[in-house]
Image: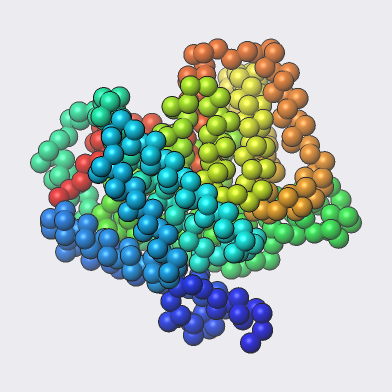
Amino acid sequence: MGEREDAMFKTTGSKWLVPVSGYLGLSLDQVNFLACQLFALVAAFWFRLYLSHASSIVRHAVATLLGIFFLFFCFGWYSAHILAVVAVNYSFIIKADLNNVHRYSMVTAMGYLTACHVSRVFIFNYGILSTDFSGPLMIVTQKITTLAFQLHDVYNLTLSFNVTSVTGGSRAKLLLCYLKRSSNTVCRKLLVCCGCMFLFIVISRSLPITYNADNHFVGHASFLTRLTYAFFSIQAARPKFYFAWTLADAVNNAAGYGFLGMDESGKPSWDLVSNLNIIGIETATSFKTFIDNWNIQTGIWLKTVCYDRAPKHRLPLTFILSALWHGVYPGYYFTFLTAIPITIAARAIRRSIRHYFIDSRVLKLGYDIVTWAATQLAICYTVMPFLLLSVDHTIVYYRSMYFHVHIISILAAVALHRKHKPREASAANNSAPPVSLSSSSSTAARPAQCQPVLSNNNDKVN
């Protein structure tokens, strides 16, 4: 068996599906992931149909046992890292002083996650597989720290849960009514998953990201050719993220979770726990709009635990936390540090010129087309190191681009900052940070019709 076959079947999790891996030509860790997601989808329907009226203890016990099974199936003994950090932080929540519980949780969870990220560099080098347990550990870190911060805030009376017009039994009846109608949403999202999987198999593999840093390509291709390939290779890398997040969203909806309320057309919306908005991403005409629709739940977490709480330097601190949360690969830090001047420049340019184009439909259309192209190219330039990971590849790529986005954004930010110094009010209005390629808002970005029903997102139907 050659090196390729060894890599294909290498995993720390279950080896039950080795024959399937060989037949499909996919790595075993990918097959295990898909198997767990499909099993979770079936289990979610069963969960909703047969356990929706069970006690919360029964439902939590079933979800916990299934989650532990999936962990060991995909990650084997590495699951102990995830279970350990959960157990430690749970002990903090139970025993620690609520006035400081958020600090204990944040330091412990982020410290352990960082230690795992460092070990990942030596274990996996620059090859990231789903056997890498740090992926689910990142999500767990979000959840347990968010809970700790919420407990601290409630204890100090800094959070006020809004009273809605639909409460108690009325809310339960409303949600149960719409639970029966989630199947159409699940089917639609599964169709999106199939389309994303097709695009990944047909297109993504033919446009490898690493080719952007290939010495022969960089040395012989023209700048326009390099720019074009970079743009399309980044576009081709998105379907795998679309697939994973949309499938996870469909599983939640199948279990009855994720009901947001009524959308603008009066139809039930099931996007409360969605992690992306594909249409919003592909049609984004600003850096912030793109980020608001990408990795939404991570953006909410970063906004909650960092951006809204930092007394000053909120944007850089949030970017640094986001990079640290993602890991210790240098490419992550290149991406987030590059995003800071681009974000500042984008805000300054928007304030300076947008008002000249909004009064005419023709001018507004032209403005939208130009800003769409600029946004997509800026995103391509910014996230390339995130996928290349290493310093060497990142420097090769940025040299091949002549650092043009860095130079333009810094010059624009400096020039326009002197012309339009931000006021405190405008800074407050821009409270949503473009972080971690993520959304920076929660229910505020949702349709207004959805908010009255679900202003308290902690309510569950028992």
**Where does residue 159 sit, x and y in percent of width and height?**
29, 27
Q: Residue at x 57, y 43 (%)?
A: 323
In depth, the one of 306 and 208 nearer the eye is 306
Number of numbered discs visible in the structure rendering: 0
Q: Is residue 393 left or right of residue 274?
A: right
Residue at horizontal 49 percent and vertical 13 percent from the top: 425
**What x and y, as percent, mark residue 11?**
51, 73
Q: Residue furthest bottom?
A: 1
Q: Which residue is drawn at the image coordinates 74% and 34% (left, top)?
A: 406
Q: Is residue 10 above or below residue 177?
A: below
Image spot of residue 166 (x, y percent): 17, 34
Residue 272 location, quadrant = top left
Residue located farthest toward the right when viewing the structure as drawn: 220
Determine whether, in the image, residue 403 is placed left or right of residue 79.
right
Q: Residue at x 59, y 64 (%)?
A: 123
Q: Quadrant of residue 361?
A: top right
**In the rendered image, is residue 239 in sight?**
no
307 relative to 22, above or below: above
Whether residue 422 is visible here, answered yes or no, is yes
Q: How has the structure been colored for display? A: rainbow
315 with respect to 227 (left or right): left
Q: From the viewer's side, name the closer residue of 86 and 344.
A: 86
The image quarter in which residue 442 lies: top left
Q: Residue furthest left?
A: 169
- Residue 18, relative to residue 278: is it above or below? below
| Residue 152: image location, x then y, percent | 30, 32
Quadrant that contains the N terminus: bottom right
